[in-house]
Image: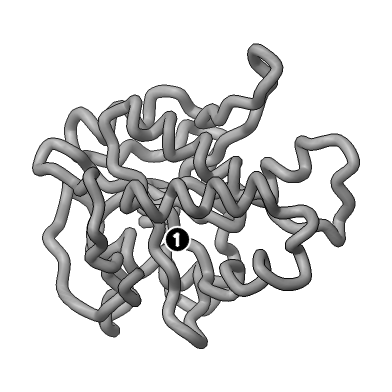
Amino acid sequence: GASPQFASAPSHGAGPSACNSGPVYMPPVRASSHRPRNSERTVVVDGANVAYNYAECLSGWTAQGPPNFYGAQLCAVELVKMGAFPCVVVHKRWMADFSDRYAVHSQQSQAALAWLRDEGYLTLTPGGADDDSFSISYAQQQQAPIVTNDKYSNHMERTILSREFAKLALNMYSFSAARGDKIWTPEEHDRLPSYVLTGIMVPRAAGRDVR
């Protein structure tokens, strides 16, 4: 597929200005049957974070084990049901890893990555780029929420991410068992649907502020 490119992006929804002024990463243009429509609002997904959290839910997983990107596929499916367009950010090294050291563990992940790519939801970071910084930069430019359980504290310390934007943008989640499979569920059930409907990000509830 095409590599991500630097460009300006239209804003979707209201929110604070980006706190960094550098170039903004844009998702690649892909041959896909499913492209964002005007009615679809982008939701950025921290692909590795979701994949690791999903893997931790599975029996037999160890701290040294690989992520399972089927979790990112489950997340994308639920976001699409909401009417959102998931932009799943994945560092390109994972694509190499799945054909190398994690090959024996990765059949489900490989299939999930292929599905995300074919649907046009997968965005690979360029070489040398940090996937968290990539996600934050793009979310700030789009004024879009980020699905992650990472509080990005180190990025706030480096002023890449403002505390105010983090309170608006970061959306935590969990995986729960259902019908023999796992389902992805946002921690605060109304925030993402509200954004999809209005284009306005709602701050985290009291007591759940980003620290």
Image spot of residue 90 (x, y percent): 50, 63
| Residue 80 position by quadrant | top left
The residue under the point 68% across, 41% down is 54
Visible residue check, residue 152:
yes
| Horizontal arrangement in the rendering, residue 25 relative to residue 90 (left or right) | left
Q: Position of residue 210 (x, y in %)?
A: 54, 50
Image position of 4 with respect to 30: above or below: below
- Which residue lies most toward the bottom here? 128
Q: Which residue is mark 1?
A: 89
Q: Is residue 164 visible?
A: no
Q: Would residue 10 appear left or right of 66 to someone viewing this image?
A: left
Residue 127 location, x and y as percent?
48, 85
Pick whichever, 19 or 85, lies toward us: 85
Quick one: SS at disc 1? Answer: strand
- In the rendered image, the quadrant that contains the N terminus is bottom left
Residue 17: x percent and y percent?
23, 64
Picture residue at 53% right of the left edge, 70% below the top:
91
Q: Residue at x 31, y 73 (%)?
A: 2
